[in-house]
């Protein structure tokens, strides 16, 4: 499975629910495992990690993931960002692989035999790196809004959310708010995924905290920094999971526990886009 | 010129961006250098982030390369596919700025592991976009701190290729120019025609003995 969203719109609500349900043995794909997979790995959900950058952005290491790898308890399959992007693109387009100009002279292909080379049929001798299609059983994305038909709109950083969703057998979109179909239809350019490509929609305000939702709430950088000492110590980390994940029944309770002070502090000032005129044609 | 080691590195890195239009930046010192450059030597500089932002005008120093402040007021946002495929691989990035835990004389960069890959002593973040930035940017500026542990004779893992792999393989014909400048708290380095690193300038107050004490091999001299 994949929970995608590049820094923006990382669905912690879904990660926490998976931990609460006690799922294990999962293969987790994500460009940047981020705190959400650090927590899931610490909770024992993961067997294998497919990724391209393993860190706490702007802070340092993902200590739980690092312990699991250094201890040999977590299988890894490693790419670069463009390689991971390409895997989803191929998966979404029903192609067997994606060709890219990367990896030449890097040791990554030596440690990941799935990174291969093809010779261009149009320019013999031009060797191009290829990565295999990735088709998750389930991709979970977070988004600003959707309607009841499952049409999902996102603005700000879209990362690989569209490709990761379209590559998956089932797509769960978790959204900040449910809106009327007219709101979606007033601005079709902003639709990341039409409802035909979405299996289920869940409404979960602040479901991406401590990540952010552009225009809704800021990244909780203080939490990202606080995670470093928490995650360094397995006992402290487990106590955190007990208190903030297993100890709360759902996201609403998490939000209540977080408290109005932190929520208010993450509120951005308004900066609306200008609007464009699509025109009415009769 | 005086300042903290970080400030000296930022100033030297900003100077490398004089007149540049497009720079692919990471967080930390490269980000500070790019913002400084746009305010001084490169007013037309477009800050490009792998998160999918072009022409960021951040209202605060971002904590991550996906900060919401990079989006508000930017020229464009796009999917990571479009950014990597059409802008980086498409040859539209003049300078890529990278950091690393280890570098060797050929400018190979390691951000993956210290020790053997299957059982690392230290597991580092990995490539992110660095491998393709090192190969596709027209030139690469490396900003990193220098010590005998980071400037090494034998690199533990090549994440992002320099001018020549330790096993002798050369860069592919399609690749960009590769590492062009390395900036540390001790000196500024460029690369000879054969692709080997050479010392071209010392940071203020630094002597050649300091360079030697902080390097795993004897770095060739090309001081002005």
Image (cartoon, rainbow, N blue to C red):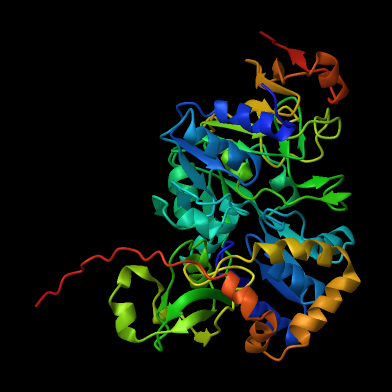
In the picture, measured across the screen, residue A84 lies left or right of residue B86, that is right
Question: Would you say residue A141 is visible in this rendering?
Answer: yes
**Residue at coordinates 24% horizontally, 65% vertically from top-left?**
A276
Which one is nearer the viewer's eye here, A254 or A193? A254
- Give the vertical position of A152 relative to A225 (above or below): below
Position of the C terminus of chain A, as image quadrant, is bottom left
In the picture, measured across the screen, residue B77 lies left or right of residue A207, that is left
**Residue at coordinates 81% horizontally, 20% vertically from top-left?**
B211
Tell me residue A226's x, y (percent). 76, 64
Q: Residue furthest top?
A: B224
Tell me residue B51's x, y (percent). 53, 54
Residue B203 lies in quadrant: top right
Position of the N terminus of chain A, as image quadrant, is bottom right
**Residue at coordinates 47% horizontally, 75% vertically from top-left?**
A144
Tell me residue B141's x, y (percent). 61, 31
Q: Residue furthest front?
A: A261
**Residue at coordinates 65% horizontally, 20% vertically from top-left?**
B190
Which one is nearer the viewer's eye here, A222 or B113? A222
Tell me residue B39's x, y (percent). 48, 35
Question: Would you say residue B136 is visible in this rendering?
Answer: no
- Give the vertical position of B70 relative to A155 (above or below): above
Residue A12 lies in quadrant: bottom right
In the picture, measured across the screen, residue A3 lies left or right of residue A160, that is right
- Give the vertical position of A10 relative to B59 (above or below): below
Which one is nearer the viewer's eye here, A106 or B26? B26
Which one is nearer the viewer's eye here, A139 or B145? B145
In the picture, measured across the screen, residue A265 lies left or right of residue A197, that is right
Count numbered badges in the picture. 0
Q: Residue furthest left?
A: A282
């Amino acid at each position: 499975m994949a929970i995608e969203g590049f820094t923006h719109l990382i669905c912690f609500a879904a990660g926490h629910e998976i931990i609460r349900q006690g799922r294990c043995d999962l293969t987790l794909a994500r460009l940047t495992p981020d705190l959400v997979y650090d927590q899931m790995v610490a909770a024992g959900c993961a067997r294998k990690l497919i990724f391209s950058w393993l860190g706490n952005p702007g802070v340092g290491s993902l200590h739980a993931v690092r312990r699991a790898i250094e201890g040999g308890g977590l299988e890894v399959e490693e790419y670069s960002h463009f390689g991971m992007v390409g895997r989803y693109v191929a998966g979404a387009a029903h192609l067997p692989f994606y060709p890219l100009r990367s990896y030449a002279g890097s040791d990554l292909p030596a440690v990941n035999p799935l990174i291969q080379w093809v010779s261009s049929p149009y320019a013999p001798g031009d060797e191009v790196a290829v990565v295999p299609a990735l088709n998750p059983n389930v991709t979970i994305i977070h988004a600003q809004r959707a309607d009841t038909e499952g049409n999902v709109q996102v603005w700000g950083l879209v990362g690989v959310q569209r490709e990761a969703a379209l590559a998956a057998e089932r797509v769960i979109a978790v959204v900040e708010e449910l809106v009327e179909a007219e709101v979606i239809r007033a601005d079709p350019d902003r639709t990341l995924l039409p409802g035909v490509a979405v299996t289920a929609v869940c409404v979960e305000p602040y479901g991406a905290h401590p990540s952010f939702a552009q225009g809704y709430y800021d990244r909780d950088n203080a939490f990202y920094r606080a995670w470093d000492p928490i995650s360094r110590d397995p006992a402290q980390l487990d106590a955190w999971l007990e208190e903030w994940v297993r100890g709360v029944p759902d996201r609403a309770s998490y939000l209540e526990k977080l408290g109005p002070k932190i929520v208010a502090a993450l509120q951005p000032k308004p900066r609306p886009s200008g609007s464009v005129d699509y025109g009415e044609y009769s | 010129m005086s300042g903290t080691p970080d400030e000296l590195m930022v100033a030297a890195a900003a100077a490398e961006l004089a007149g540049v239009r497009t720079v692919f930046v990471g967080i930390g010192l490269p980000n500070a250098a790019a913002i400084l450059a746009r305010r001084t030597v490169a007013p037309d500089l477009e800050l490009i982030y792998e998160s999918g932002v072009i022409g960021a005008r951040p209202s605060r120093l971002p904590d991550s390369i996906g900060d919401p402040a990079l989006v508000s007021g930017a020229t464009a946002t796009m999917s990571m596919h479009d950014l990597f495929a059409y802008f980086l691989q498409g040859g539209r990035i003049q300078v890529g700025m990278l950091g690393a835990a280890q570098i060797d004389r050929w400018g190979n960069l390691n951000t993956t592991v210290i020790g053997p890959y299957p059982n690392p002593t230290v597991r580092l973040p990995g490539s992110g976009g660095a491998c393709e930035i090192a190969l596709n940017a027209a030139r690469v500026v490396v900003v990193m701190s220098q010590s005998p542990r980071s400037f090494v004779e034998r690199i533990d893992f090549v994440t992002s290729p320099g001018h020549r792999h330790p096993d002798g393989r050369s860069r592919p014909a399609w690749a960009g120019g590769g590492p062009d400048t390395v900036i540390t708290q001790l000196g500024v380095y460029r690369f000879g025609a054969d692709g080997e690193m050479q010392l071209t300038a010392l940071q203020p107050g630094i002597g050649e003995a300091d360079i030697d004490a902080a390097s795993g091999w004897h770095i060739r001299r090309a001081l002005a």
